[in-house]
Structures are given as structure tokens and as C-alpha cells.
Image (spheres, rainbow, N blue to C red):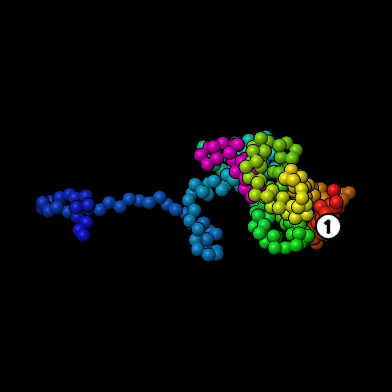
Amino acid sequence: MSLRPFLPQSWNSRGTRICTLRLRRRPHIWISNGGLKSGPAIMTRPSEITRERILKAAERLFAERGYEATSVRAIVAKARVNQAAINYHFAGKEGLYREVLRTAFHALTEQQLAHGEEAKAMSREQALSEFVRRQLQPLTARDDVSRYMRIFNWETARPTAIFRKLVREEAAPFMGVAVDLVRRFMPGADQRTLTLAAIWLIGQCSVFVRNREQLAEPPVGITVDDEAIERIATLVGGWAIGGLTRPG
């Protein structure tokens, strides 16, 4: 099929009709350096790079200062962007904080969700021990996870409406894993009792994770390493099994 009818036409100096084809430029696409190190290149647009830079800057500042004490101006300066970029990607400070919280929450619960089906094939005691062990893993984490824990510590001290709303919307799958686990120890309990038991179980682990930095200081003075996590997991797991199996 001839393309001539579909191409723009003009005339040359000799009166001969010619066809010209105009090519539309495509926007530049950046290739991240990470793609050069392992596997195929990852195509990253400049706007995605900007968005990630804002998120990282916000994570650090929210971890250091909390939500209320962190200004948009401080985030803009640390991320080296203008305020319009925050408004464009997150619709303002509140939307940015929500995204930081969402990322943090998923990072801290994804392992439990990924092993949910696997745990069902274990004995209830083994499944509970593994649940406790995974809950304690952030004790030795650094960088992002460490900042996430500081952000949640701020929420414990000064809870925000943004966090409460996020928990209502995002926590159901994780709570479902915990409830299913305690149900195996309390098959005759009603849903409210199971939910309270699940919250109690999570709390037995989170008290260590939230206070990780204080654990290393006097008067406790615990060296938080893999050996310490294993010991804490064994103790907490044993106490939890004893509590859940005790006739009530």
C-alpha cells in the first residue's frame, strides 16, 4: 500500500510534487545507574527521580523531627526541589507524609504477609515463633527501616489523624495474619477476643523494636544483634504460647 496519500505534500522548484515526513521528538528517558550494575536497564523518568528524592528527604526529616515540626520549606531544601514539585507529586505535606507512612508500614509488614500461607502448614507453635522472629527483625535493621521505626515512635508520642486513617485503610491484611494465628490457639474465641489477642501479641514484639536504641543504654545494656534477636524471640514466643494456651 502506498504511503503517499498519508504524507504531507509540497512542490519543489521544478514543479514536481514531493512528500515530506516530519518526525515527532520523544521526551528524554533517563536510565538509572542501578540497571547497569545488575540485570536489564531500568527506565526512569526525571519526574520519578524527583519524586523519589522528595520521599527520601521527607523520610529523614520526619524521622528526626516528627510530622508537626517538619516544614515544607525544610523538605524542599533537603530534596533540592521547589514546592511545586511536592504539590504535583503528593498534593502537599499531608499527602507526602501519608505516602511516607504507607511505604514504612508496608516495609514492616510485607514479610509477615509473604509468609502467611507458609505459616498455615506449620504447627501453631512453630508458626507463632516464626511470627515473633519476623516482628523482631527490625531490631538489627539500618537505614530506611531504622527511620521508619523513628517515625512510628513519633506517632506513639504524638499521633496524627493521617496515621490513624492509614491504619484503618492499610492494616487489615496484616491484622488478618495475626488474628488467624491466635485463632489456632483459641478456636472457640469470638472475633473481638481474637483481635485483642492479636494486638497483644504484636505489642509483645513492638515494645522491643520501638525502644531499640534505649535497650543498648544503661541500665539494660543489651547488645542488639542476631544472637540477641534469637534469644528475645525464643523468650517472647514461649511466653506468648503459654499465655494463649492457658485456660481462660
Residue 135 visible in rendering: no
Residue at 20 percent across and 58 percent down: it is 2
Residue at 47 percent across and 54 percent down: it is 30
Q: Position of residue 47 (x, y in %)?
A: 49, 47
Tell me the element at label 1.
helix
Residue 44 visible in rendering: yes
Is residue 131 in the magenta section?
no
Under mark 1, the amino acid is Gly
Give the left or right position of residue 157, taking residue 166 as reference.
right
Residue at 15 percent across and 50 percent down: it is 11
Q: Where is residue 50 in the image (x, y as percent from the top left)?
A: 53, 46
The span picked out in magenta is: 87-106
Q: Quadrant of the N terminus?
A: bottom left
Label 1: few (<14), some or many (≥20) within 10 Å?
some
Which sits in the foreground, 78 or 209? Answer: 209
Q: Position of residue 60 (x, y in %)?
A: 66, 45
Give the left or right position of residue 185, taking residue 10 as reference.
right
Farthest-out residue, right: 219
Q: Where is residue 204 in the image (x, y as percent from the top left)?
A: 80, 49
Q: In which quarter of the image is residue 110?
A: bottom right
Is residue 89 in the magenta section?
yes
Which sits in the foreground, 52 or 3? Answer: 3
